[in-house]
Image: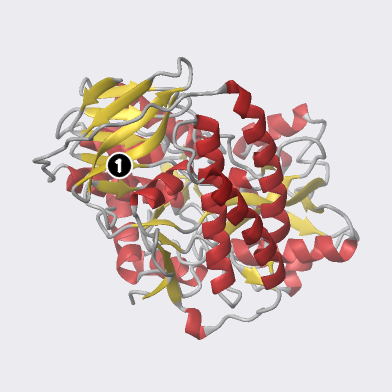
């Protein structure tokens, strides 16, 4: 096996990973390892923007309040304060580095999204903020001679010695060769898991690999039962769910039932701009009651030229599908979009395992609670990506030996087995662990996942069979927590426990070979 040595290893090349790599480069040699190309990530496809206090009529206190309200009692206050206050610094920092957000007459064009009490959403390229921001950081990373990118490498194991992480083992998806990376610190920024569901807004790479790797290494997993479904993903049978940004509703778009009625006006004072969990659940009920697979998003009452300019990329994509967003009713339904929980960290993005840091969607820092406030995610990448790099740089490793490792091979004959499992799992996850769950369905799903885990538990040397084991493990973590949380809160709705229960105002923590724990919310 090839062996490389670095000061810091960053797994993932979304905004969190690129931010962590950029700042880590000031402290030593950095490897950026990604299983596809550097520019493939959830961050790259983010349409909405980045939330930050930028005007005199707004304040950090208001942003904190909005975040806590959306989080439905499960946000850790100290983490939210770090996010909002340092977020302003990080945004101004990247502006100083040359990042261009959309402006008009010398002022930033600020958008409005669900759950926000003020216009505070910075955007770039209209509806291409994620692409512009990620590309900006990618260029900054490429300028750093101490950063070494490794594409098409899938990490198969976090290496551990003396109860601390000492590196990673990866397999080259093109050649099948195994590579060992040694380091004083590993920053995991592998993104979410929404591709485990049949209908998702995420790229194919969002399968939760990092969660499984961290769990197997002994990291704590928190609040993973909370999955955010984006309310307005385009519904066209036979095609992938295409995200229609929440910012579209922020500019005044309406959600209509099949009779043309704006049903959200009767449900929440913010109507279409209610927090995502409320909007997604309301659409789910409309779909169930109507017997149709979608409701409508309408922009027909808005200025068409303004809409074309503000949402140029969405407009062009819909035109290619035969839809004019300024004239036509757009069929939409919720799709799995964001993992609200993740790998538990402290305020420095550090896990319970020395040498392992998490940032971005893969992390549970305490800022998201039970339901992410729109456009806080890119901000979280900037804030905790930098914090991770600074803390990681302080570590030393007296004995970073990785021990003797058995190689992992790619057996192409097992690919079809994995793909069949993946499709079956997506159906089960969507049916039993989608927007609405109940005990009977969760237990059916859990029984299936446990059977798969037992079958593939000892598969340690075949890439595809390991992926089956890891995926089943992640799904069982979601199901375990969903079964334990006997209430409805944020992105977790139980039809058999429809009310929010104050007794469940706690984080649900899972760790390998340990019983589920409850951790108080930090207020």
Q: Nearer the viewer, residue 459 or 433?
A: 459
Q: Nearer the viewer, residue 28 or 142?
A: 28
Q: Nearer the viewer, residue 514 or 74?
A: 514
Q: Residue at x 70, y 78 (%)?
A: 496
Q: Residue at x 65, y 73 (%)?
A: 269
How many badges with numbers are in the image? 1
Q: What percent of the width, then of the height, locates residue 380? A: 38, 51
Tell me if mark 1 has few (under 14), some (14-19) or many (20+) residues whose alpha carbon lies within 10 angstroms of its own: many
Q: Is residue 124 visible?
A: no
The vertical placement of 434 against 413, above or below, is below
Q: Residue at x 73, y 70 (%)?
A: 265
Q: Quadrant of residue 259?
A: bottom right
The quadrant of the rendering that contains the C terminus is bottom left
Instruction: Locate residue 384 relative to residue 438 in the image: left or right.
Output: left
Q: How is the image coloured?
A: secondary structure
The vertical placement of 305 against 334, above or below, is above
Q: What percent of the width, then of the height, locates residue 412? A: 59, 22
The quadrant of the rendering that contains the N terminus is top left
Instruction: Locate residue 263 relative to residue 131 in the image: left or right.
Output: right
Mark 1 = which residue? 187
Q: Is residue 101 visible?
A: yes
Instruction: Locate residue 3 relative to residue 511 in the image: left or right.
Output: left
Q: What percent of the width, then of the height, locates residue 324? A: 79, 36
Q: What percent of the width, then of the height, locates residue 392? A: 19, 44
- Find the residue positioned furthest to the left: 398
């Amino acid at each position: 096996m090839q062996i490389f040595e670095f000061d810091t290893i960053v797994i993932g090349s979304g905004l969190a990973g690129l931010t962590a790599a950029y700042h880590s480069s000031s402290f030593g040699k950095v490897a950026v390892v990604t299983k596809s190309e550097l520019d493939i990530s959830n961050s790259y496809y983010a349409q909405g923007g980045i939330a930050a206090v930028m005007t005199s009529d707004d304040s950090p206190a208001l942003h904190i309040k909005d975040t806590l309200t959306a989080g439905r009692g499960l946000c850790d206050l100290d983490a939210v304060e770090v996010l909002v206050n340092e977020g302003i610094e990080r945004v101004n920092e990247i502006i100083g580095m040359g990042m261009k957000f959309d402006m008009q007459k010398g002022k930033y064009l600020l958008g409005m999204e669900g759950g926000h009490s003020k216009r505070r959403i910075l955007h770039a390229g209209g509806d291409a903020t994620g692409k512009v921001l990620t590309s900006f950081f990618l260029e900054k990373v490429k300028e750093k001679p101490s950063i070494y990118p490794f594409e098409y490498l899938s990490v198969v194991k976090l290496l551990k010695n003396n109860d601390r992480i000492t590196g990673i083992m990866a397999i080259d998806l093109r050649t099948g060769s195994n590579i060992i990376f040694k380091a004083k610190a590993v920053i995991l920024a592998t993104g979410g898991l929404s591709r485990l569901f049949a209908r998702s807004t995420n790229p194919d790479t969002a399968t939760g690999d990092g969660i499984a790797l961290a769990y197997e290494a002994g990291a704590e997993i928190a609040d993973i039962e909370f999955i955010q479904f984006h309310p307005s993903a385009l519904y066209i049978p036979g095609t992938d769910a295409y995200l229609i940004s929440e910012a579209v509703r922020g500019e005044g778009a309406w959600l209509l039932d099949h009779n043309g009625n704006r049903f959200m006006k009767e449900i929440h004072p913010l109507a279409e701009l209610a927090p995502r969990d409320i909007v997604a659940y309301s659409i789910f009920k409309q779909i169930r009651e109507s017997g149709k697979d979608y409701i409508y998003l309408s922009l027909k009452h808005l200025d068409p030229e303004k809409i074309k300019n503000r949402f140029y990329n969405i407009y062009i994509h819909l035109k290619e599908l035969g839809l004019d967003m300024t004239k036509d009713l757009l069929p939409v339904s919720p799709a799995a979009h964001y993992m609200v929980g993740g790998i538990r960290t402290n305020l420095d993005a550090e896990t319970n395992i020395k040498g392992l840091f998490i940032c971005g969607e893969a992390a549970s820092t305490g800022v998201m609670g039970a339901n992410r406030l729109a456009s806080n995610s890119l901000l979280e990448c900037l804030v905790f990506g930098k914090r991770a790099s600074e803390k990681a740089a302080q570590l030393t490793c007296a004995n970073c030996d990785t021990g003797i490792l058995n190689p992992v091979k790619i057996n192409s004959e097992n690919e079809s087995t994995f793909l069949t499992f993946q499709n079956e799992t997506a159906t089960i996850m969507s049916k039993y662990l989608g927007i609405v769950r109940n005990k009977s369905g969760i237990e059916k799903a859990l029984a299936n996942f446990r059977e798969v885990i037992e079958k593939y538990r000892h598969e340690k040397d075949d890439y595809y069979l390991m992926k089956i084991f890891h995926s089943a493990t992640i799904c069982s973590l979601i199901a375990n927590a969903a079964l334990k949380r006997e209430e409805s809160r944020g992105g977790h709705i139980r039809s058999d426990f429809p009310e929010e229960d104050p007794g469940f105002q706690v984080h649900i923590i899972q760790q390998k070979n340990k019983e589920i724990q409850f951790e108080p919310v930090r207020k």
